[in-house]
């Protein structure tokens, strides 16, 4: 009798967990994309391997498929859960991460049936209810400054719609997009020679050592999604710059110095 009760409780809990993912894993504090932040993969539950699921991600600049991003530009993304057979429903979850596993860019034009969910300061796009079609499309705006390579992780399932996780199929995949070699991105290399960050991670004050005071310069600080959160002037008679960062929320930021036609950028972490 005890064994029967345990089996019943396990089955009941499994169904509850599965049903909770019907409105998005991140909404229930789960990353199922296969990213470094994942606590598992979508096919850990939907593991029967039915429907021969494979996943596809494409990034479009207008009508052309591209693999490079220009800072500040918007791109259309098309996701597909490819399969064989006739599944009844589909599930999606995706996340965009830089090399520090911080979410980057900004999602836009999310279709009905999908949602943006923030989990542990990381943004996910995922289904808000089980989807009848195998496609997910949305627009994404690249961060205002290059953050290097960005990896897009995607977990997807094809389900038979029987209310359980038997007879389903799932997969994960990833796509790496790289910054386009523009003059704005090359300025990151120039920045290594002209200024350094003396405090990183940052507690209360961001301290910079700036070696180019030949012309008037100014500075800006961006969030990891490309929003300007602070601006500051630069005294040409000083090589050390101190910026009060005490009110910044913990996370990844970009400090940029505009000097003539040069845009010099570096990343720092606020703790």
Image: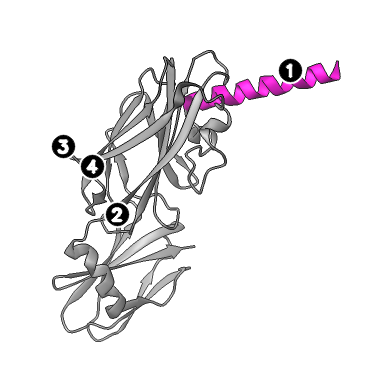
Residues at discs 2 and 1 in contact (Cβ within 8 Å): no
Residue drawn at x 22%, y 53% is 70
- Label 4's element? strand
Q: Nearer the viewer, residue 175 or 6?
A: 175
Residue drawn at x 43%, y 53% is 102
Q: Nearer the viewer, residue 47 or 238?
A: 47
Residue beneath disc 2: 178
**What stretch of residues is rendered in magenta?**
1-23
Residue 7: quarter of image: top right
Where is residue 46? Give x, y as percent: 55, 26
Q: Please tell me whether the stretch drawn in magenta is mainly helix, strand or loop.
A: helix
Residue 107: quarter of image: top left
Residue 226 in sight here: no
Sooner in the amino-acid sequence: mark 3 or mark 2: 3
Residues at discs 3 and 2 in contact (Cβ within 8 Å): no
Residue beneath disc 3: 63
- Label 2's element? strand
Residue beneath disc 1: 8
Residue drawn at x 21%, y 48% is 73
Where is residue 144? Give x, y as percent: 25, 55
Where is residue 134? Give x, y as percent: 36, 23
Q: In the displayed structure, would residue 241 be above or below residue 20?
A: below
- Label 1's element? helix
Residue 172 in sight here: yes
Image mark for residue 75: 4
Sooner in the amino-acid sequence: mark 3 or mark 1: 1
Sooner in the amino-acid sequence: mark 1 or mark 4: 1
Where is residue 240? Give x, y as percent: 33, 82
Q: In the displayed structure, would residue 133 be above or below residue 200?
A: above
* Label 2 – label 4 distance at C-alpha: 13 Å
Side of 40 relative to 184 (left or right): right
């Amino acid at each position: 009798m005890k064994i029967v009760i345990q089996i019943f409780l396990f089955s009941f809990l499994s169904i509850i967990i599965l049903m909770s993912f019907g409105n998005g894993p991140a909404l229930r504090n789960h990353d199922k994309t296969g990213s470094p932040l994942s606590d598992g993969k979508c096919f850990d539950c939907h593991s029967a391997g039915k429907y021969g699921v494979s996943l596809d991600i494409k990034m479009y600049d207008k009508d052309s498929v591209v693999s490079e991003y220009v800072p500040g530009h918007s791109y259309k993304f098309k996701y597909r859960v490819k399969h064989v057979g006739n599944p009844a429903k589909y599930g999606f979850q995706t996340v965009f991460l830089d090399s520090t596993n911080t979410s980057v860019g900004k999602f836009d034009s999310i279709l009905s049936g999908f949602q943006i969910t923030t989990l542990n300061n990381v943004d996910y796009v995922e289904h808000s209810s089980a989807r009848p079609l195998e496609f997910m499309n949305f627009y994404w705006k690249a961060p205002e400054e290059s953050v290097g390579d960005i990896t897009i992780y995607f977990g997807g399932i094809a389900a038979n719609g029987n209310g359980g996780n038997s007879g389903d199929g799932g997969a994960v995949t990833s796509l790496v997009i790289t910054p386009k070699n523009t003059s704005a991105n090359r300025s990151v290399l120039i920045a290594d020679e002209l200024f350094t960050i003396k405090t990183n991670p940052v507690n209360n004050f961001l301290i910079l050592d700036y070696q180019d005071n030949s012309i008037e310069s100014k500075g800006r600080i961006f969030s990891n999604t490309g929003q300007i959160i602070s601006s500051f002037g630069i005294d040409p008679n000083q090589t050390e710059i101190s910026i009060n960062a005490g009110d910044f929320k913990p996370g990844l930021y970009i400090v940029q110095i505009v000097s003539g036609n040069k845009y010099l950028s570096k990343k720092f972490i606020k703790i």
